[in-house]
Amino acid sequence: MPAPISQKPLPESQDVRILDLAAEHVRRFGASRLRIVAVAQDAGMTHGNVYRYFPSKEALFDAVTEQWLKPVEAACRMIAESPDPAFDKLERIIVSVHRSYRDKLEADPKIFDLFCQSMEEGRAVGRRHRTRLQAEIQRVLDEGTGGGMFDISDQRRALALVFDAVYRFMSPVSIRLDKDVPRTQMDARCDRCVRLSLRILASGKI
Amino acid sequence: MPAPISQKPLPESQDVRILDLAAEHVRRFGASRLRIVAVAQDAGMTHGNVYRYFPSKEALFDAVTEQWLKPVEAACRMIAESPDPAFDKLERIIVSVHRSYRDKLEADPKIFDLFCQSMEEGRAVGRRHRTRLQAEIQRVLDEGTGGGMFDISDQRRALALVFDAVYRFMSPVSIRLDKDVPRTQMDARCDRCVRLSLRILASGKI
DNA sequence: CAAATAACAAAAAATGTTATTTGTTATCAA
DNA sequence: TTGATAACAAATAACATTTTTTGTTATTTG
């Protein structure tokens, strides 16, 4: 029998505590109303001490966003690493990202706004997140090409084309614009659009 | 020899004058800094009189936006009415809209912002504009289907699919997000994406 | 009558002031 | 040495006040 997992979770390290509290503040009041002093107070410390962990308010926001986006990337990696055919994985990854974003938009609209803002301002958090997703997709694409599943002359171009065609379902800003369109409808359209784009990719005629 | 066209243009009607001045104010300072009193002053009248022509500031903004978007619609209609094959026209319309938007973004970024805002807020101006573009496209689509060029079971669905796939190049908000990507690159990607989407449409397998 | 103005209340924006917050640094305690 | 605090200047937000703007309506002008 393995050693029992400690029932009481270890006392979180301060940076994680601050991060969680900050996320909660954003969830409740939105980023513009978050005050470092208030977060510090909730954490039972002076505001100055928060700066030991996060060099600036923006850095704190970025950390909140990054943390909050991790599950999306994890789900993506999960699929990418599964032993299924590359084509299927590609489809599932894109659909998964769309669904995850939509879930997150509905669960935490204020944090989603933070995410969108970072994209609109072209800041590093958003860019890095997208790069990580793209890397997973690129990996699957390579795998598919290696196995002779995709016949692609210019891979880079192919990837760009797929991203362009499914942009509406992968771009947080676009997804937010469609927030009032029923989920079922958006999901169905996403599925169809992804399938279409990938069929072209598979046909290799680009 | 035909009668000479009057050299001096007819004195513009007041509403057009006000519209032009308002557009210029938006161009210069952005919508948020536009003051009805200032426009009225430029037009040489009291601000109260502006309300004889436009019932509210929002109505004035909408009129500016609508006026400013007319050339996009005109170009679209021009193509739709040409005697070319439906397939070609469809492609040219979408590409034309993308190019027009991009031109306008570069020429009048502040008015473009006004347009984007109306889309983001789901206001009538933006919706009507899009509806008019869609109507032209639908017309061409019908034409193509009638001539046996497209084999489509569910037209409504087909149109939605094409719009989804070229969304990045047709949505003003998306285009603005890509404002720093070189035009030549965006244009090339637009062309490829449109061609891809339409090929699917032509194949009829949806 | 059509086109404009003048005058007005309500809403919004600018202003100036005070209080809070941000971010740094020097200091303290374990 | 690590984790915290206290104290501080500069930046920001909050707030009350004044001014401008918006939108209406009654009145004038040609």
Image: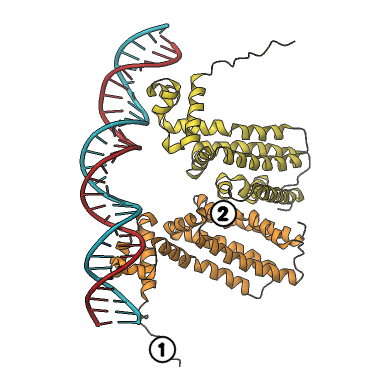
Chain colours: A yellow, B orange, C cyan, D red
Mark 2 and mark 1 lie on one chain; the one further toward the N terminus is: 1
Coordinates of residue A24 in the picture (x, y in percent): 50, 31
Q: Looking at this view, is D24 or C29 the one in front?
A: D24
For this view, does C16 lie left or right of residue B199? left
The correct choice, above or below, for A73 with respect to B15 in the image is above
Coordinates of residue D19 in the picture (x, y in percent): 22, 53
Q: Which residue is mark 2?
A: B186
Disc 2: which chain? B
Q: Looking at this view, is B168 or B41 the one in front?
A: B41
For this view, does A172 lie left or right of residue B198? left
Q: Furthest-bottom residue in view?
A: B1
Q: Which of the labelled discs sits on residue B4, or is there none? A: 1
The kind of secondary structure element at disc 2 is helix
Coordinates of residue A169 in the picture (x, y in percent): 63, 47
The correct choice, above or below, for A76 with respect to B18 in the image is above
Q: Amino acid at mark 2?
A: Met
- State how many labels appear: 2
The kind of secondary structure element at disc 1 is loop
For this view, does A66 lie left or right of residue B61? right
Q: Quadrant of residue B96?
A: bottom right
Q: Which of the labelled discs sits on residue B139, or is there none? A: none
Q: Amino acid at mark 1?
A: Pro
Disc 1: which chain? B
Q: Dot 1: within a 10 Å radius of its alpha carbon, few (fewer than 14), some, or many (20 or more) residues?
A: few
**Residue shown at the point (75%, 48%) measured from the top left:** A202
**Residue shown at the point (54%, 71%) measured from the top left:** B74
Residue at mark 2 to residue at mark 1: CA–CA distance: 45 Å
Q: Quadrant of residue B61?
A: bottom left
Q: Dot 2: within a 10 Å radius of its alpha carbon, few (fewer than 14), some, or many (20 or more) residues?
A: many
